[in-house]
Image: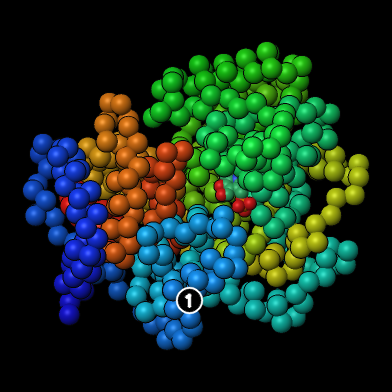
Amino acid sequence: MPASAAARLVFCRRSSSWPQHQLFRRALSQRATKTKDAPAASAVVPPSELPPFDYVPQPYIGPSSDEILAKRREYLSPSIMHLYKTPVNVVDGKMQYLFDDKGRRYLDAFGGIATVCCGHCHPDVVAAIVEQTKRLQHSTVLYLNHSIADFAEALASKLPGNLKVAFFTNSGTEANELAILIAKMYTGCHDVISLRNSYHGNATGTMAATAQSIWKFNVVQSGVHHAINPDPYRGIFGSEEEKYARDVQDIINFGTSGNVAAFVAEAIQGVGGIVEMAPGYLPLAYDMVRKAGGLCIADEVQAGFARVGSHFWGFETHGVVPDIVTVAKGIGNGIPLGAVVTTPEIAKALTQRNYFNTFGGNPVCTAAGLAVLRVIEKENLQENALLVGSYLKQRLNSLQDKYDLIGDVRGKGLMLGVEFVTDRELKTPAKDETLHLLDQLKELGVLVGKGGYYGNVFRITPALCFTKEDADFLVDAMDYSLSRI
Ligand SMILES: Cc1ncc(COP(=O)(O)O)c(C=O)c1O
């Protein structure tokens, strides 16, 4: 059966077996979601087949989805969530594709939450991990090993100014916790400023810095002031960067002693729904914070490592140089690895006491990190992120012209967001429609992420080896799914 027919069949079978979707679609069809000039829904056909890819996964002989789900329910924390009504049992990954237990290939446009930057199981990264694992898996930094030193040197070479001293961690949360601690020790101050709608992690300090109620438990979270988010789409001042920056100064003037420890921000908010900052905001905010004695922390956990395309780091797109940079996710292509990079002077603050991390800088993880940096360079992945990301954004913009449901398309490189609203004027979040579209795309073989405070944003953060053909398939699948709403 040709793939196009198979896709149609999958879609038809799914929709006919889910009467609630029919009802949902009928309710939605009473509201015009397509713009006036849009072609009739019947004119849009599902994308025919995924771009050719020369890889056949091993047959899967493990437990079924139902068995895994049953074990998860019994033995894993009920807090662990999954996407989709029927979650995908992912058993294989190769570059920008994932394979389920039946051998079906999916275009992975989420990249393990902006983490798989070189591609799933990239051979160079796998080889580095295997070679290092065979030789020495763990020793701690109490002994010498070249892996951590080589990677620290390579990482420093990618950062501007005097940002050249690294402390390795296992996650983004740990990296941000440490960065905030260093800032407090260095400045002797306690107040931290972060942006509303941000996500920085889920330990004590980082949960306090995170500013979305859905990620904040009801526990004491002190010492962080949340500045008005300079969000050009939903923010109260549109793109007027000076008005947003004034709030940072107001916080310093009226909420602190006049001196602060740090300002922490993502260059593009990831979990918050791929929210970019009003251009010109960051230099103003950095200036105010530094005048108040604080350090500027760039959380590059999602936007770093070539993802934004035009630059290697997200902060570079704002023309600033931070005092501390935190990284995780893409740095290891899926291996647990994070880092805090700062200047030698600031780094000294951590020598006031003993600070130790058992796995931080592990030889296997740092060997993977070095391989990731080499692959990004060897395969021109930053350039590809720019090229394919710009093309994809352009195609998504055209889709926005066609469907009123798309309120905003934003982001840079291969860190893109599509926000769905039921009313463009009121910007009413189209939460149910977003979930429905997410499921429909999965049926067509495309996996995207979901985010934003209201859960109404598609997060498109694939591996940086994503191709134009992949971008076309993704947009065609969205077009088809939107046309059926
Ligand atoms: C910007 C940002 N910072 C920090 C974190 C926390 O990273 P981790 O989940 O590795 O602790 C995340 C996770 O999504 C993130 O997006």
Q: Which residue lies furthest to the front in this view?
A: 74
Vertical order, 381 against 31 (above or below): below
What residue would you read off at disc 1? Answer: 67
Which one is nearer the viewer's eye here, 43 or 421? Answer: 421
Q: Residue at x 40, y 28 (%)?
A: 234
- Side of 1 relative to 377 (left or right): left
Query: SS for tag 1?
Result: helix
The amino acid marked with disc number 1 is Glu
- Side of 197 relative to 413 (left or right): right
The answer to whether residue 375 shows anywhere in this view is: no
Q: Residue furthest right?
A: 353
Which one is nearer the viewer's eye here, 349 or 7? Answer: 7
Vertical order, 234 against 202 (above or below): above
- Side of 453 relative to 328 (left or right): left
Which corner quadrant of the image does residue 103 belong to? bottom left
The answer to whether residue 177 shows anywhere in this view is: yes
Task: Pinpoint residue 64: horizontal percent, then vertical percent.
Answer: 44, 78
Task: Pinpoint residue 326: horizontal percent, then vertical percent.
Answer: 66, 46
Task: Pinpoint residue 343: horizontal percent, then vertical percent.
Answer: 76, 41
Which one is nearer the viewer's eye here, 472 or 201? Answer: 201
Q: Residue at x 58, y 71 (%)?
A: 125
